[in-house]
Image (cartoon, coloured by chain):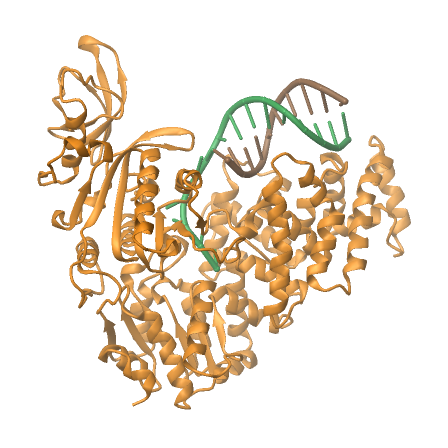
Chain colours: A orange, B green, C brown
Amino acid sequence: MSSLLSALNPEQREAVALPHQSALVLAGAGSGKTRVLTTRIAHLIQSGQASPHGILAVTFTNKAAKEMLSRISAMLPINTRGMWTGTFHGLCNRMLRAHHQDAGLPQTFQILDSADQLAVIKRILKSLGADDEKFPARQVQWFINNAKEEGLRASQVETYDDFVRKMVEFYLVYEQQCNKEGVVDFAELLLRNYELLHRNEIVREHYRSRFRHILVDEFQDTSRLQYKWLRLLAGEQTAVFAVGDDDQSIYAFRGANTGNMKEFERDFRISKIIKLEQNYRSHGNILDAANTLIRNNSGRLGKNLWTAEGHGEPIRVYNAPTDFDEAAFVVDEVKSLRAEGVALSQMALLYRSNAQSRVLEHALFNASLPYRVYGGMRFFERQEIKHALAYLRLIANPDDDNALLRVVNFPARGIGMRSLEQVQDDARRQGGSIWEAMLQKCGRVPASTSETEGNAQARLDGSMAPDKIKKGVEGFVVLIESMRRVCENLPLPEVVDHMLEHSGLLGHYRAEREGADRLENLNELVNAATSFVHEAEDDSLTVFLNHASLEAGEHQAGGGEDALQLMTVHSAKGLEFHSVFLSGLEEGLFPHDNSRNEAGGLEEERRLMYVALTRARRRLYLSFTQSRMLHGQTRYNIPSRFLQEIPDNLLKWLQPVQKARFGSQQPEFRSSGLSGARTQIQESGTQDSAATRWRVGQNVVHAKFGPGVIVNCEGRGADARVEVKFGRAGTKWLLLEYAKLIPA
DNA sequence: ACTAAACGCCTTTTT
DNA sequence: GGCGTTTAGT
């Protein structure tokens, strides 16, 4: 038997050694999913069934793609060049670039990230004079992306009422604008490529005969369009090897469709689903918690993880009074874990939403613990970086209106709203780009009409001071032109360098009080360009800019060091750590309030919780707070229902250290373990119930509504009433005289 | 006419 | 805390 296969368990081996046919592998968390995928590829190559050239592998993040490649290289002494690996978006980009003409795109087409897209939409809405109360830009963005996800162009969307008609109108203008500027958004990458394959038989057959093996990681997270793309790309001779876990589907909000697994089974005539259920990652208690929790979901494909390891440690639960205390608790535990010899990089702090990271970061910073934040404000999404990228985009293609508008007056160079609107109007009238309009304004176009145009303009806008306008605009035009000229034959890092200095960005941030971080980031951009030149096959500016759009999250300053890992639960998927801290387990936060209205929202939140739990190998901390500062307001919360879905016997409740002297107690808890912990804490503080007046933040139990927390107090004596937020019954005002509230 | 400071707004998760 | 819009100042 091949040495590749000998290290696998029977199910893994079966999957890896499958003959040339499509297959679906249902792989639980920590069951060796990536291992199966990479070994399969290595096996295909080693046994001569495929060459790297004939393999296409789709992953969900760029990180995963890199990981996959490095693991394959470790198994086989071959170069993986020729193999196509990457995200759906990355692969589509690659293919579109190779066939830009067939796809109707300029060679240097640029990619809009979500923020760019939103900016374009806002601009359009403004120019159309749309009512932004009735048509918020976000909603328009959502509408457009959804339509694209459905595979629909503006002309194809069914307009059944005025509202939709309006939306479609925006969509249409947006489409035209993007085409004019030669930019594509994320959804467009997929749709364009789908249309290309659909329409163009030559291209389609080319790739069909080339890629006889397609492997898909995280299949449960594919969207409808992505699935349709796969189906189009896979010919009769193609074996599609899909690996996924329906319990870890956490991207429904961006179109992921677990139903694809069932469709895949049918469309690709899958005879047998291989299930990987042995978990090699976590100890028993952690796995039991995850299994019990996820059983509350309906419609699962069914799967139960088991481990050959022992139960391990109990799951530690901590109830903090405030988010501040929660962070302090995490810091303490991290310190002692480190003292026990656990590397910081083997500890993760997970949270539901990015906003939660700040308190944690603050505490870690003060404790001088090195940490690294993933996601959140990504490197390529920082404003100074976006400014810099905008200049680079203009160097690559000055017709990029979006980029131009971003930096035309940044740093300030005397181009105000007035003159901008003018140039924009001109551009619209002529159907050209803003850049072209600017060139004309400055009399820089030798073309036939330029002179008369310029004069006509000046007359039209007689009320303005044309000289002044021209001055600012002209300065900008000269700047961009000179940058383009100088950078034409410069290597990429020097282009960046030159741009940073001459655009005035460096000067601007040097002069700013709080500009140090930004300067550092800009400097890091030069480094990013340098390493890009070393790694990429094509190191042109255009490809670098694409890289920046598609891999916004990958790059970060200060890698290398042993540091604590901070990230959202979403970005933790696929990773594992010795110890995991999951913070903010509160109703409204996790599960998040916004998920309540969405169909299947709660179940998705639960899968998210499942993902979080299964990241831990050895130790797992769950924490929640009674009050939390969020968006500048204090919120009072009750513990997450997910805590109650974990069996009590797996949990160990921790107490604030300063209370320890009271305690013989490993406290005994009532059936709901939750209120128990709090009782304990309160009793050690103020035993007297008379002394504890009703106060905001107080946890209470109501006979009918169950547990809740006081969020507001009002009145005295007989009129005294409190506003209580209940877990199940919502928020209510209660008269203290009548409502039988019990302090919890 | 342009800039900078001040105010009110929103804030889930990501390619 | 960041954003876009409004306002006051040059």
Q: Is residue A708 left or right of residue A235?
A: left
Residue closer to the observer: B9 or A386: A386
Q: Position of residue A334 (x, y in %)?
A: 33, 47
**Residue A237 seen in render:** no
Residue plotted at (65% across, 68% down): A539
Quarter assignment of residue A262: bottom left
* Quadrant housing the N terminus of chain A: bottom left
Residue at 30% of width from left, 43% of height from top?
A: A596
Pick the front one: A236 or A33? A33
Front residue of A150 and A208: A208
- Residue A78 in percent (x, y) is at 48, 83
* Relative height, residue A225 to residue B2 (above, below): below
Determine if residue A682 is in view.
yes
**In the figure, is residue A36 to the left or right of A522?**
left
Vertical placement of A707 versus A26: above or below?
above
The total of numbered circles placed on residues is 0
- Quadrant of residue A50 within the rendered picture: bottom left
Residue furthest top in the image: A717
Residue A742 falls in which quadrant of the image? top left
- Residue A622 is situated, as x and y percent measured from the top left of the image, at 26, 46
Q: Is residue C3 above or below residue A33?
A: above
Q: Position of residue A400 (x, y in %)?
A: 68, 54
Q: Quadrant of the C terminus of chain A?
A: top left
Q: In front: A506, or A337?
A: A337
